[in-house]
Amino acid sequence: MNGERIERELARLREGGQNADLVLDGRWYVIYRAVPTAGSQFSLPVETDVIVPVPEGYPAAMIDLAGLPKDSPFLPRVKGGQNNQGQHSVNGVEWQLASYHPHNGGGGPPWDSAKFGFDTYLDHLIAWLDRLA
């Protein structure tokens, strides 16, 4: 895992006003804070935190999956949210990973480590939380 690269990517997000943290809790994760959602149309929150596991071998290995707090009202409404990909306790929060794969047939372009990173993954998370069922 290339921690220096991830920190540069997260710094770009912070410069744009998006808070995201690289966290080690048994393994590495990125936690995006207050990601906007389309929740208002369902009387749900307009933002939520999202966790993404850092793949071993990043950046050669593609970023995949996304998780929400395990009791999140968004899990039944997001693509792949009902397909539990595991629960992780990180920073005192129980997270449930969803079957969300934007770079592997999920609507995004194929993974290219020269173009994509945790900074660009935010775009996919925003789109994911904007398409609620």
Image: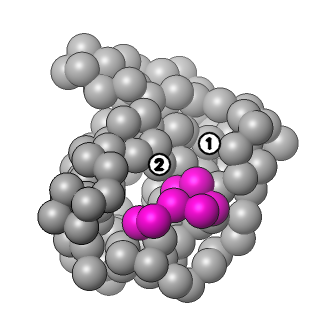
Q: Does 32 sit above or below residue 100?
A: above
- Based on the picture, tell me whether residue 73 belongs to the magenta stretch: yes
Q: Does 13 sit above or below residue 118?
A: above
Q: Nearer the viewer, mark 1 or mark 2?
A: 2
> How packed is label 1: few (under 14 Cα within 10 Å), some, or many (20 or more)?
some
Q: Nearer the viewer, residue 21 or 4?
A: 21
Which residues make up the magenta segment?
67-74
**Residue 7 picture location, percent across and down:** 48, 22
Which residue type does callout 1 highlight?
Answer: Tyr
Q: How is the image coloured?
A: one colour
Residue 29, which numbered label?
1
Residue 19, which numbered label?
none
User: Who's the residue at 58% across and 54% down the image?
Assistant: 69
| Residue beneath disc 2 | 50
| Label 1 SS | strand
**Residue 61 picture location, percent across and down:** 53, 57
Q: Is residue 58 visible?
A: no
Question: On the image, which quarter does residue 92 sit in?
Answer: top right
- Based on the picture, tell me whether residue 129 belongs to the magenta stretch: no
User: Who's the residue at 52% across and 38% down the image?
Assistant: 31
- Give the residue at the far right of this rendering: 26
| Label 2 SS | strand
**Residue 106 picture location, percent across and down:** 31, 78
Magenta-drawn stretch, dominant element (helix, strand or loop): loop
Question: On the image, which quarter does residue 91 sit in?
Answer: top right
Q: Quadrant of the C terminus?
A: bottom left
Q: Does 19 sit above or below residue 29?
A: above
User: Who's the residue at 77% across and 49% down the image?
Assistant: 89
